[in-house]
Image (cartoon, rainbow, N blue to C red):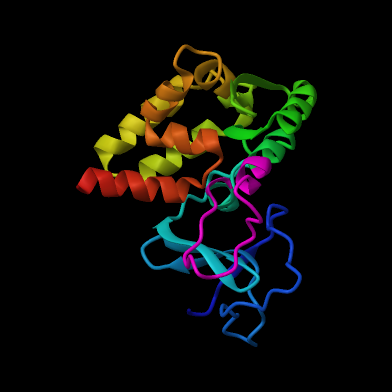
């Protein structure tokens, strides 16, 4: 762990636990416990990002800096808390039970913390969510799985109103090789007047279509940080 970690305050940061000893990650300057999403600037316009919960690292990646684009619906926490990520399976985590991430996704959708997501909850909880989602501008499909209900939901707002696509496209063109850069730029541009709900909730085989969408579109639709997505695209292009 080096110095110069910059904290990016984010209300998604899980609350400090009770009865859990703090983890090993500390600020190099002063030894203060790290808790939150941090970025460290690296040479060659790269950055290193880590999410830390009460001193325990949950995710850690490197990718290109993409300074033009930002959005309140995009966060380094979104992939972590949606998927229940951790770097050490033996370390404490904020995920209290097997449905914790599903509940987090459901709440994140209601409060505009991500534009699209899927979750599975007990029927009573899911029906309560369905009763609220209309007021949040969300569209959903739901199906019963035994005593559970699986919900796929997304905002009806078009991508061009949700995000600064011009800034994101410019960033991708700056950090990717020409061929994948133009491919991803074209995919994002084609989505301007579409919406997460129209393309990946209401369409036939919506979940299959989403799984087949270009990485830049999938990452944006889930509210994942584009630097992490760009690193994946670049790695696939070099494979």
> At 43% from the left edge and 60% from the top edge, which residue is drawn?
61
> At 29% from the left edge and 37% from the top edge, which residue is drawn?
180
Is residue 183 on the magenta stretch? no
Is residue 101 on the magenta stretch? yes
Residue at the limit of the structure toward the top, as seen here: 204
Residue at the limit of the structure toward the bottom, as seen here: 30
Q: Main secondary structure of the magenta part?
A: loop
The x, y position of residue 217, in whole percent, is 45, 32
Magenta-highlighted residues: 82-104
The x, y position of residue 94, in whole percent, is 64, 60
The x, y position of residue 40, in whole percent, is 50, 68
The reply to whether residue 68 is visible in this rendering is yes
Front residue of 143/59: it is 143
Residue at the limit of the structure toward the left, as seen here: 239
The image quarter in which residue 147 lies: top right
Front residue of 170/70: it is 70
Relative horizontal placement of residue 87, taking residue 36 as reference (left or right): left
140, above or below 106, in the image: above
């Amino acid at each position: 762990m080096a110095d110069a970690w910059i904290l990016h305050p984010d209300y998604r940061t899980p609350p400090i636990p009770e009865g859990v000893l703090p983890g090993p990650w500390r600020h190099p300057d002063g030894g203060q416990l790290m808790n939150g999403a941090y970025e460290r600037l690296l040479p060659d316009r790269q950055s290193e990002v880590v999410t830390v919960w009460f001193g325990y690292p949950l995710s850690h990646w490197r990718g290109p800096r993409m300074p033009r684009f930002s959005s309140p619906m995009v966060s380094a926490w979104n992939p972590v808390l949606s998927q229940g990520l951790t770097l050490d399976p033996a370390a404490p985590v904020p995920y209290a039970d097997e449905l914790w991430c599903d509940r987090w996704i459901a709440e994140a959708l209601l409060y505009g913390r991500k534009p699209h997501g899927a979750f599975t909850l007990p029927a009573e909880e899911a029906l309560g969510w369905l009763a609220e989602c209309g007021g949040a501008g969300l569209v959903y499909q739901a199906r019963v799985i035994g005593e559970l209900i699986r919900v796929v939901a997304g905002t009806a707002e078009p991508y061009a109103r949700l995000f600064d696509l011009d800034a994101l496209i410019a960033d991708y063109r700056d950090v990717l090789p020409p061929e994948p850069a133009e491919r991803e730029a074209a995919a994002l541009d084609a989505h301007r007047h579409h919406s997460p709900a129209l393309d990946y909730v209401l369409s036939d085989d919506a979940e299959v279509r989403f799984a087949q969408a270009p990485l830049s579109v999938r990452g944006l639709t889930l509210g994942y940080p584009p630097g992490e997505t760009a690193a994946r695209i670049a790695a696939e292009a070099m494979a």
